[in-house]
Amino acid sequence: MKTNLSVLSFAFLSVVFSGCNSSPSGVEWKSFSGDKHIEQRVDSVLKQMTLEEKIGQMSQFSANQSITGPVMSDDFQPYLEKGFVGSIFNATSVEGIRRMQKIAVEETRMGIPILFGHDVIHGYKTIFPIPLAEACSWDLDMMQQTARIAAVEASSDGLNWTFAPMVDISRDARWGRVMEGAGEDPYLGSLIAKARVQGFQGGSNWQSLYETNTLLACGKHFAAYGAAESGRDYNTAELSEHTLRNVYLTTYEAALKAGVATFMASFNEVNGIPATGNKRLMTDILRNEWGFKGFVVSDYTGINELVPHGVAKDEKQAAELAVNAGIDMDMTGATFIKYLSQAVEEGYVSEKTIDNAVRRILEMKFLLGLFDDPYRYLNEKRAYQNTLTPEFMAVARKAVAASAVLLKNNNNLLPIRKDKAVTVALIGPLMNDSVNLNGEWAALGDRGKSISVLKGFTEKYRDSPVRLIYAEGSGITQTTPAKIAEAVSAARRADVVIAAVGEDYNWSGEAAVRTDIRLPEAQRELLKALKATEKPVVLVTLSGRPLDLSWEDENLDAIVQAWFPGTQGGHGIADVISGDYNPSGRLVMSFPRNVGQVPIYYNRKNTGRPVNPQDERVDYKSNYLDASVTPLYPFGYGLSYTTFAVSNVKIDKKELKVEGGKITVTADVQNTGTVDGEMVVQLYTRQLWASVTRPVKELKGFRKIALKAGETKQIAFELTAEEMAFYGVDGKKKAESGDCKLWVAQHAEDESNELSFEIME
Ligand code: BGC
């Protein structure tokens, strides 16, 4: 799709607001920062602006240095020169950004500086594991830290806005964008949303936006983008108010409470109305109910897409619908710049709506300090000094190890310690690969320079008696009998086989949906041949989504889910395999037994005919004829090189008052093995009856704790009525009375430590 921007006309119109046909959003702009001084400065700028200049502020163009959607025209120079550009994204160098900023500031009538945005999702140049992987670390401080580093690197390159974090709840492994989020759980997802927002923005205080090493964050994609039917990207989300409120909206609200400066509208429709033109979402909920004071950007050509969605007859009407719904900035679609002044003249959009949007955008520019010094982010020396530093590399390496999840480890096959005199056959398409390791949305990460798994192992075992032999065995999708034979021969000469398998990096991310989530056939063929050698096989899986690993689970000896690990991938994976790092990751998305189970998530409902997991074949129950209803690996699951036990679970009282009630849950957690390790202790609850059905399990707390071999620690959780609150039959969020259970568990299916309590008036 190409838009011919040159035919636009920019006649300066005298604006008379007369009788509106479509309803303007009507929400008064209120200062995000609450700073009167900034409010006055914003007003003084606004007062001097023409309507076209205002609409220009609401328009974002792509410099097209990284392409993330249909290529629109990058011929925005004429707008830039007139001062009709509010933001540019995908510009990625200090020099280029300076050139554009200079035109905006020094060569236009108003001289308003530009916001420069980019998809800084999991690192900028130092690439960290994909967000889904990082979430499996359950380490909020670490996630805040990696977002912080990403902000330092990106802001050093002149950027001041990231389109992250993606906080969409993801329950469907077919959907490629699960790689960008924090998985299926609203509670954990909300905490991760907060950690990431604060990492990018430099804290919870908006004053930190003034620092030159912070970025505006952007909560996306509002709303319910992850609920796309059948996992197909951009597809319809059909959600009850109950599920929207209790599940899908939770993480956006958490991002907002953490101070997120901007939101991005999602592409999808929600209950019949595309989010981009959805006033209820963008204004009634986001602004009026939640009190959001920042600004909202459309997603890419989301406004233009209101036409094919079928809620606008043409792009002009789409622009009117979007701005009246509450969209403040048009990303690349050029609908605002083409049609809004006419819409104002005709009375379809009020100038007040325009003013409110522009105020919100200008306020961010003030908060960033761009009006004080538009070049303050632009410093070549800083760009050079602040990227790929040894300190960032160390954090990235640790993040790789902390994100890996040990799914299976028969007979303690792992770790392969450095002092073992063994021969290891290193096999598989992703063993000697750098290109795929960064995964999708890897900003300016240099794909060729990521540490391959082979390199990681080679360095790890360099001065050790461990002997390594390598054979590729298969490409990602193709192999040959000769390649397989070579791999089999290597396996035969070895004591143990490690196979690095998985997906191509662009099989996940945007518009990357799979209906078969097994390993590709060529790789399965390779694994079967390796299995036939009867050598123990360790699988290292690199993927952007949970895969169906049923065959691998049944037939192989150990599995490490390493996701797409980023710049330091090979080193971090070698740390895990060698036991230098004891795996501590826990799944944040359920792994299905087959794609037919998808969407599958632990916090499902019971139904009126629940299945007894001990006897799933009983007729007329909510089961399958040909598979279990349980996942292959549940949410919260992950092994360690040691073992843990939870005991002595107690609550200080059995009643939780609906108003302000609180109970304390304590438990002893012991490392029952022989090596030190970290455990993620998880608190789950279930309310057995209420005015609406409640999930069979809900995460309400967790602690990631380090325990020396043999050590026991007592941990405590506070469970409040507020945490037990949900949107009930009256549409209000509150705790309701009812009988409840709780578990202090090692994963979502662990019911070994169960207690009861009651919520009461
Ligand atoms: C994606 C967004 C992204 C934007 C800009 C869109 O296609 O959905 O997540 O931020 O492009 O690159």
Image (cartoon, grey):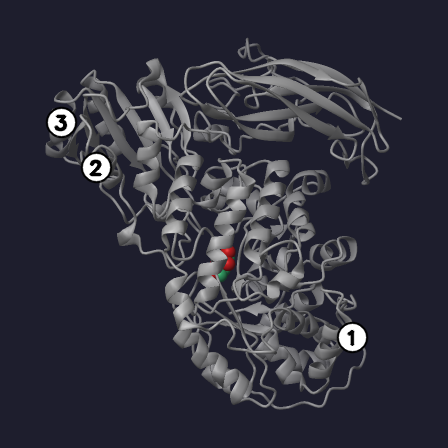
Mark 1 surroundings: few (<14), some (14-19) or many (≥20) residues within 10 A: some
Classify 503 as above or below 506: above
Q: Which residue is mark 3?
A: 490
- Amino acid residing under circle 1: Cys
Image quadrant holding the N terminus, namely bottom left
Front residue of 737/454: it is 454
The quadrant where residue 611 appears: top right
Relative side of 474 to 624, left or right: left
Frontmost of labels 2 and 3 is 2
Name the residue located 46 percent from the left edge and 74 percent from the top edge.
3
- Amino acid residing under circle 3: Ala
Give the percent coordinates (x, y) of residue 8: 53, 84
The quadrant where residue 342 appears: bottom right
Relative side of 654 to 480, left or right: right
For residue 342, the mark is none
Mark 2: secondary structure: helix
Mark 3 surroundings: few (<14), some (14-19) or many (≥20) residues within 10 A: many
Q: Is mark 2 within 8 Å of ligand 1?
A: no
Mark 1: secondary structure: loop
Between the C-alphas of marks 2 and 3, the distance is 16 Å
Classify 164 as above or below 760: below
For residue 20, the mark is 1
Tell me which numbered mark, 2 or 3, is placed earlier along the sequence.
2
- Amino acid residing under circle 2: Thr
Q: In the rendered image, is residue 349 in sight?
A: no
Q: Which residue is mark 2?
A: 458
Mark 3: secondary structure: helix
Name the residue located 44 percent from the left edge and 36 percent from the top edge.
403
